[in-house]
Amino acid sequence: MSIQTVPTTPFAGQRPGTSGLRKKVTEFQQPGYLENFVEAIFLTLGDPGEGEGRTIVVGGDGRYFNRDAIQTILRMAAAHGVARVLVGRGGILSTPAVSCTIRKHAAFGGIVLSASHNPGGPTGDFGIKYNIENGGPAPEKITDAMFAHTQALTSYRISDAGPVDLDQVGKTRIENMVVEIIDPVADYAELMARLFDFKAIEALFAGGFRMRFDAMHAVSGPYAKTILEGMLGAPAGTVVNCEPLEDFGGGHPDPNPVNAAELIAHMEGLDAPDFGAASDGDGDRNMIVGRGIAVTPSDSLAIIAANATVAPGYKGGIKGIARSMPTSQAADRVAAALGISCFETPTGWKYFGNLMDANLVTLCGEESYGTGSHHIREKDGLWAVLFWLNLLAVRGQSVEQVVRGHWARFGRNYYSRHDYEAVDAAAADAMMTALRERLPELAGQSFGHYRVALADDFVYTDPVDHSVATRQGIRIAMVDGSRIVLRLSGTGTEGATVRLYLERFEADPARHDIDTQVALSDLVAIAGNISGLRHHTGRESPTVIT
Ligand code: G6P
Ligand code: ZN
């Protein structure tokens, strides 16, 4: 066993996006491609100090190339002075579990192999992201440094050791580094049991409450099975599609009503269970469904905030809430009622890290099916599901009753997102540029019964470290609080994805039953007119509506 220095040359385009470096598997399989990026990670981290004993956590969502990538990363970690690596058995660790494990073991950081909700398999996507010692995604100054290193590499360092058996819990060595294969679920399950009232949830299941958790053949299967069926006594078969598969069974592990159509159909059927939920590829997203009602992520955040104290981990109340800019303002109403702050951040969980570290917020959420709290520094799919179970157990109400009760008290923020996927990138850029130029003239203009109060390209100044993020999406806010938001996705791997977010507030409970798309149709038309979306993209209608 010895450490080799292998000559290399830079690859173009290794810039981490919203959530790490995401590319087609075939791109990652080019000789040196993964190695270069991993070398850039280690160069950015710098050499460990004398006697530092640096520990890192490594795991992934089990997608195709996960195991190969882990073997390479282990051999490179050994060449970069890492003392110990904790690896989930079978190479499995959900994104929230990585965050939890980093924090619990006071690790230096962690590497997550995942392209989240993007399809997997040999023709699908792969991804790699780095998390820092607070357990959260690396902030931009770190990912920028990684990118800079990728452009200047001339070599990488790697041990020539053979592969490690990832399937046996226990310790082995590569060079001077200890490789510890750990149970991927244990640390995480222990944390959940401290946050939620497991006795109450157990009693709920014992009383005949029925649930369907669709793990979409992705990473949350083993977690959900252990916790829901093992610890909480839910009947066997509650967790479906629970085996993580390298290609997610050919599915698209993105929990929204379009991709989780099977779950939605179950929840609308005659024999619908009381509660339905799903998670994504790496287990950080969640979808909450009741009988005949899918809860929008924005509403879910607001409902969790309004009811936080039902869960033991939050019984002292919450400090504040943060939501990404395109997320609806439903949470703002709860924050106002509770007399706490609500922060509006750019899209990307990494922007919540400082707010949580500074104890300014307890709960965070995004419209993109992400919800979480300061228990870790990632969004957490199963956490949200357990919160809802805790809430339903305490309240003794159905999902629909909880949601309607919330709207009756706070008003309803009708909300929808229209995605235009795989649009020509240049056309999408041209649309955004033209729109930016129009912004100054929009304020004060009327469109039908809407009048524009504010039109800008969202700029965020982090209240903790004062870093500034510009060009985070176009906001067109109406005088009545309705909003149109337009931005380009930072996670796609094919062309550009235009996201159009629409929101309208309705206080009157007598008007809480309008079909969402009907309620938002005027705003859709206005957005089309202002942005010239059709003209620029050549698209008549969105590819996905959620
Ligand atoms: C990932 C990030 C989220 C983000 C989402 C959508 O899941 O962790 O924070 O909201 O991607 O990002 P996009 O740029 O595609 O809208
Ligand atoms: Zn994810």
Image (cartoon, rainbow, N blue to C red):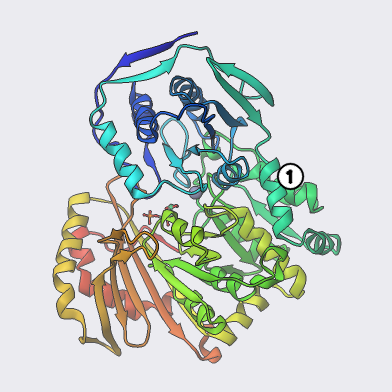
Q: Is residue 479 left or right of residue 70?
A: left
Residue 209 x, y percent position in the rendering: 79, 63
Residue 4 x, y percent position in the rendering: 39, 12
**Which residue lies at the image location 58% right of the left edge and 35% below the top edge?**
245
**Which residue lies at the image location 41% right of the left edge and 33% below the top edge?**
123
Res 28 → quadrant: top left
Q: Amino acid at mark 1?
A: Thr
On screen, residue 497 above or below 485: above
Q: Nearer the viewer, residue 487 or 418?
A: 487
Residue placed furthest toward the front: 50
Q: Does mark 1 have its CB less than 8 Å from ligand 2?
A: no
On screen, residue 375 above or below 318: above
On screen, residue 438 above or below 120: below
Residue 1 x, y percent position in the rendering: 50, 8
Quadrant where the C terminus lies?
Answer: bottom left
Within-10-Å neighbours for mark 1: few <14, some 14–19, many 20+: some
Res 464 → quadrant: bottom left
Q: Nearer the viewer, residue 117 or 138?
A: 138
The residue labelled by disc 1 is 226
Q: Nearer the viewer, residue 28 or 102?
A: 102
Residue 514 visible in the shown view: no
**Which residue lies at the image location 59% right of the left edge and 71% below the top edge?**
318
Residue 529 x, y percent position in the rendering: 22, 74
**Which residue lies at the image location 63% right of the left edge and 72% below the top edge?**
317
Q: How many marks?
A: 1
Residue 187 visible in the shown view: yes
Q: Nearer the viewer, residue 32 or 422?
A: 32
Q: Secondary structure at mark 1?
A: helix
